[in-house]
Image: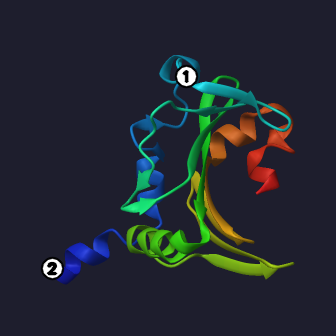
Amino acid sequence: MLALNFLQGQTIEELDKRYGFRELKFGMNIDTLLANSIIRQSKKNGKLYERHAEDLMVDGCLVESIEYESCKNLFCGVLITASLDMFFCLKNRIESRYGFPVFKNYDKGVWRYWWIGEDVGLCLRLENKNCYIQIWSKKIYKQGPENQQGGVVRDF
């Protein structure tokens, strides 16, 4: 029975069930949720938010920053930055929750691991001395201006 419970969380469908990050669900109006946050413009479309006094522990792994992205004032993605020494901690936590990546590649010194559900995508990237986790709503990005070309997801 214990093994069965352990295996139940190891599916990519769990990524779609969560449909967000922490208490925030993709599609929520981000301006009211993160009203007292630091705001900066993303590279092309939307805004990036950083919460004041953010809990920087993600599944027991210490990260350096968590940024929330909006598209048309809707929460559509999150970018987590961590140091290189947290890579295996984060990768192991993601694999225990969603199973092994559906795709991985190495290009120009950058490793990328991909978990892609019906509605949500997750990419773990290892580059230089940092690792990054990008989680995004595929539905909202499709609806975004110019499909978010040049936005955080396309740059990732």
Tag 2: amino acid: Leu
Residue 16 in percent (x, y) is at 48, 53
Q: Nearer the viewer, residue 78 or 128?
A: 128
Q: Secondary structure at mark 1?
A: loop
Q: Is residue 14 left or right of residue 109?
A: left
Dot 1, crowdedness within 10 Å: few (<14), some or many (≥20)? some
Q: Nearer the viewer, residue 150 or 125?
A: 125
* C-alpha distance separating marks 1 and 2: 39 Å
Q: Nearer the viewer, residue 114 or 61?
A: 61
Residue 33 in percent (x, y) is at 48, 22
The N terminus lies in quadrant = bottom left
Q: Is residue 132 left or right of residue 36?
A: right
Q: Secondary structure at mark 2?
A: helix
Which of the two discs, 1 and 2, labels the residue nearer the N terminus?
Answer: 2
Residue position marked by numbered label 1 in the rendering: 29
Residue position marked by numbered label 2 in the rendering: 2
Quarter assignment of residue 133: bottom right
The residue drawn where x is 38% and y is 60% is 59
